[in-house]
Structures are given as structure tokens and as C-alpha cells.
Amino acid sequence: MRSQAAALYEKGATREQVKAALGSVAQLNVLAELEAKGYKILKRRIRIGKSRPHIQYTIGPKEGSNEATETMEGT
């Protein structure tokens, strides 16, 4: 499930979208773990319909490298 959450965030997803897709908010720590490993977490406010603004998270490459985004498989 962690790799699924990472894949959703890699494409750009809100916490609400991840919870709806995976049925769990426990995967929110994926962002904190990747940020601690040096990956850049991009945040953007978006509005979905007439709802309040949501924050869309996108996982960027590690700071100072050109690496592709690491997935959470096996961790």
C-alpha cells in the first residue's frame, strides 16, 4: 500500500484522493519519509469543484540529484 500511495503522490494527489483510493490515511507518512530521505515534496493549493481548497502533493527528485523518484516498495 505504501508504494501505491507513493505512486499517487508522484503523479500529484491530495490527501483526500489518496485516502479515497486506498481507504487509509495511514499512508500520509509516506511524504514525511521521502522528505526525510531528501526528496522534494511540492505543494500546490487546488480547488476541486466548489469545495474548500485542498493541497496537492507531488514528489520531486532528490535535492541535488537527477534521480527518478524512489518508490516505497520493500520499505
Image (cartoon, rainbow, N blue to C red):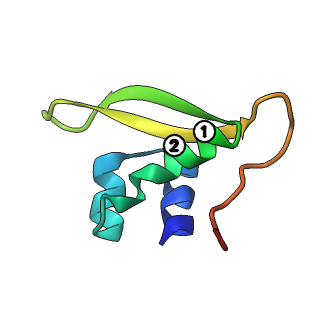
In the displayed structure, 66 sits above or below 71; it is above
Give the CA distance from mark 2 to mark 1: 5 Å
Residue 40: x and y in percent read 64, 33
Mark 1 secondary-structure assignment: helix
Q: Residue 63, image x and y in percent?
A: 76, 30
x then y, percent, for residue 12: 50, 44
Q: Residue at x 14, y 35 (%)?
A: 51
The quadrant holding residue 14 is: top left
Pointer 1: residues within 10 angstroms few (<14), some, or many (20+)?
Answer: some
- Residues tagged 2 and 1 counted as in contact (Cβ below 8 A): yes
Quarter holding the C terminus? bottom right
Q: Residues within 10 Å of mark 2 (few under 14, many from 20)?
A: few
**Picture residue at 19% right of the left edge, 37% below the top:** 49
- Up-down relation of residue 62 to residue 45 (above or below): below
Q: Amino acid at mark 1?
A: Glu
Q: Which residue is mark 1?
A: 35
What residue is at 72 percent from the left and 49 percent from the top?
Answer: 69
Outermost residue, left side: 50
Q: Quadrant of residue 60?
A: top right
- Judge from the rendering whether residue 66 lies leftward or rightward of residue 38; answer left or right: right
Q: Which of 74 and 69 lies nearest the eye of the viewer?
A: 74
Q: Is residue 3 above or below residue 69?
A: below
The count of marks equals: 2
* Drawn side of residue 61 relative to residue 65, left or right: left
- Looking at the image, is 67 positioned above or below residue 2? above
Q: Is residue 7 left or right of residue 68?
A: left
Tell me what residue is drawn at x 67 percent, y 73 percent: 74
Dot 2 falls on a residue whose secondary structure is: helix
Hey, what amino acid is under mark 2? Ala
Identify the mark at residue 4; answer none if there is no mark.
none
Question: Of the numbered discs in the image, which one, if any, rests on residue 32?
Answer: 2
